[in-house]
């Protein structure tokens, strides 16, 4: 099993940097994944993956990224001109990206030919986030950082874009001074398969070189099985399964968990776990994946099966990550979890190694509890049942469901039934509360964040009056 460190999703409060915008040009959420560090004389050779979200609607044909040590970070006025070598000074790394059509890396820096961007051996990926938003990831970036590997700093970075790859291009947008944590704290761990009968458990270690204790919070999420370029990614569909609350971390007080059991449902035991670490003293949230190399043989690989109570219906959705000779899904319902009847049928893709999304709407659910399961049928007639889920459609049952995700026009629409809207709150990934206004039409609500909220993933929470909290991740373009 491969374990890697993903330094991602910068605290949105720390990203309130000045941004110049033309043609809806915006760059947000820069993040680092640390691949390796190795000493080389008095320097440290760092190998990282870098990613950020960009709005491609307009002035982003050519995008440039620069990284510095904090004490060597220069003051650059992007409103006057694109930076040249004298402006960049002791820059550690420069990247040049062609975003006009298929995204690719450039081997030259048009603003100044004496600046040589990193190019050889790098790969670049693009994930479509909907609308004009894209998540850009550049892998295998290697450069020397002066000083010992044990003392790697927080890097500072700038990103800027232009419409023309000319010698003196106009800067259409920029993001200045974002911080990127390289190597501390470090999250490692794994999922224990405990084959053949399970149950799955996980090991988790969070360590730091800081001798002074500081407060952190870590949360665990089950991956939703949706793949991007064949890989799992931390996203809006992942399900929170644990919240540590505020806890202390130092070099003498590491966080250590061994063989911890966790809840997962029948046929969903191939899902990985994401660990999200935040703290007031951390410049960014740190996200790590506990990979799942456990084996399971099924007609299809079912990553997720969920149900949601709507106003007058129940919505079912499920995700597969692999299908081989599958025929169809029969949707079955019961009132007692014993006797099931078939509600409908959804055709399967048949053969697929990509993530597939399915859905079914029960427009006439019973009053009270409704139990659902999927009968996953192969082309040869063999079948397997999914786990069973229960949705309460009682007279006082609470319905809380997003109406569109990603949110459109920086407004979050959601359904809320049998619960007070005053119990709804919005947070960024660092746990900082976001102020908003709320309007209502029947059981449908529209939430409008205040104070120029940045693009990224947010947490919409409902504190239920009787007991419990319901949380939903929403992407804000």
Image (spheres, helix red, strand yellow):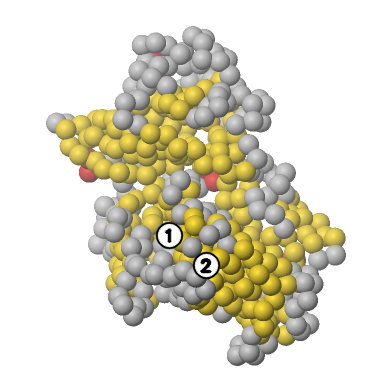
Q: Which of the 4 image quarters holds residue 112?
A: top left
Residue shown at 54%/72% (left/top)? 376
> Dot 2, crowdedness within 10 Å: few (<14), some or many (≥20)?
some
Q: Which of the 4 image quarters holds residue 418?
A: bottom right
Label 2: which secondary element? loop
Question: From where the camera sits, is residue 358 visible?
Answer: yes
Relative to the observer, which residue lies in front, 181 or 265? 265
Asked if residue 279 is positioned above or below residue 100 in the image, the reply reads below
Q: Are marks 2 and 1 in contact (CB under 8 Å)?
A: no
Asked if residue 435 is positioned above or below residue 121 in the image, the reply reads below
Measured Cα–Cα span from mark 2 to mark 1? 35 Å
Which mark is first along the chain, 1 or 2?
A: 1
Residue shown at 57%/75% (left/top)? 375
Report x, y in % for residue 472.
61, 62
Which label sits on residue 379?
Answer: 2
Farthest right residue in view: 442
Farthest left residue in view: 41
**Which label lies toward us, 2 or 1?**
2
Residue shown at 71%/68% (left/top)? 361
Relative to the observer, which residue lies in front, 365 or 160? 365
Report x, y in % for residue 49.
37, 39
Q: In this view, does 404 lie to the left or right of 205?
A: right
Which label sits on residue 101?
Answer: none
Q: Quadrant of the N terminus?
A: bottom left
The residue carrying mark 1 is: 274
Asked if residue 11 is positioned above or below residue 100 in the image, the reply reads below
Q: How many labels does the image show?
A: 2
Report x, y in % for residue 33.
37, 44
Report x, y in % for residue 254.
29, 63
Q: Is residue 393 left or right of residue 106?
A: right
């Amino acid at each position: 099993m491969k374990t890697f460190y993903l330094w991602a999703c910068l605290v949105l409060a720390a990203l309130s940097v000045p941004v110049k915008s033309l043609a809806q040009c915006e760059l947000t959420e820069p993040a680092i994944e640390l691949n390796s560090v190795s000493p080389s004389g008095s320097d440290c050779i760092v190998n990282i993956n870098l990613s950020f979200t960009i709005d491609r609607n307009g002035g982003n044909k050519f995008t440039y990224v620069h990284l510095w040590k904090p004490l060597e970070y220069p003051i650059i006025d992007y409103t006057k001109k694109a930076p040249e070598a004298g402006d960049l000074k002791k820059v550690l790394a420069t990247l040049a990206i062609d975003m006009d059509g298929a995204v690719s890396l450039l081997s030259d820096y048009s603003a100044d030919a004496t600046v040589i961007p990193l190019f050889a051996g790098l790969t670049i990926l693009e994930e479509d986030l909907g609308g004009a938003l894209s998540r850009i990831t550049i892998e295998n970036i290697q450069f020397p950082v002066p000083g010992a590997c044990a003392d790697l700093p927080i890097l500072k970075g700038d990103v800027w874009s232009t419409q023309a790859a000319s010698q003196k291009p106009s800067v259409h947008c920029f993001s200045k001074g974002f911080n990127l944590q390289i190597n501390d704290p470090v999250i490692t761990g794994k999922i224990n398969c405990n084959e053949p009968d399970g149950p799955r458990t996980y090991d988790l270690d969070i360590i730091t070189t800081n001798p002074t204790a500081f407060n952190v919070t870590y949360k665990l999420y089950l991956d939703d099985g949706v793949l991007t370029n064949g890989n799992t990614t931390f996203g809006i569909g992942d399900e929170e399964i644990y919240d540590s609350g505020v806890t202390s971390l130092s070099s003498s007080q590491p966080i250590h968990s061994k063989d911890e059991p966790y809840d997962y449902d029948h046929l969903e035991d191939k899902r990985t776990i994401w660990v999200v670490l935040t703290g007031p003293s951390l410049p960014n949230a740190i996200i790590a994946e506990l990979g799942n190399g456990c084996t399971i043989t099924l007609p299809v690989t079912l990553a997720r099966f969920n149900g949601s109570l709507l106003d007058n219906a129940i919505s079912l959705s499920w995700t597969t990550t692999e299908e081989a000779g599958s025929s169809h899904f029969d949707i079955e319902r019961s009132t007692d979890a014993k006797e099931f009847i078939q509600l409908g049928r959804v055709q399967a893709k048949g053969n697929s190694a990509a993530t597939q999304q399915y859905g079914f709407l029960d427009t006439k659910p019973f009053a009270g509890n409704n139990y659902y399961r999927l009968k996953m049928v192969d082309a040869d007639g063999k079948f397997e049942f999914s786990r069973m889920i229960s949705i309460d459609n009682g007279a006082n049952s609470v319905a809380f469901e997003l109406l569109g995700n990603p949110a459109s026009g920086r407004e979050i629409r959601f359904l809320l039934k049998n619960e007070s809207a005053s119990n709804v709150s919005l947070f960024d990934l660092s746990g900082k509360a976001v102020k908003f206004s709320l309007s209502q039409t029947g059981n449908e609500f529209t939430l409008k964040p205040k104070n120029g909220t940045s693009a990224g993933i947010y947490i919409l929470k409902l504190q239920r009056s009787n007991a419990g909290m319901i949380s939903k991740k929403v992407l804000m373009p």
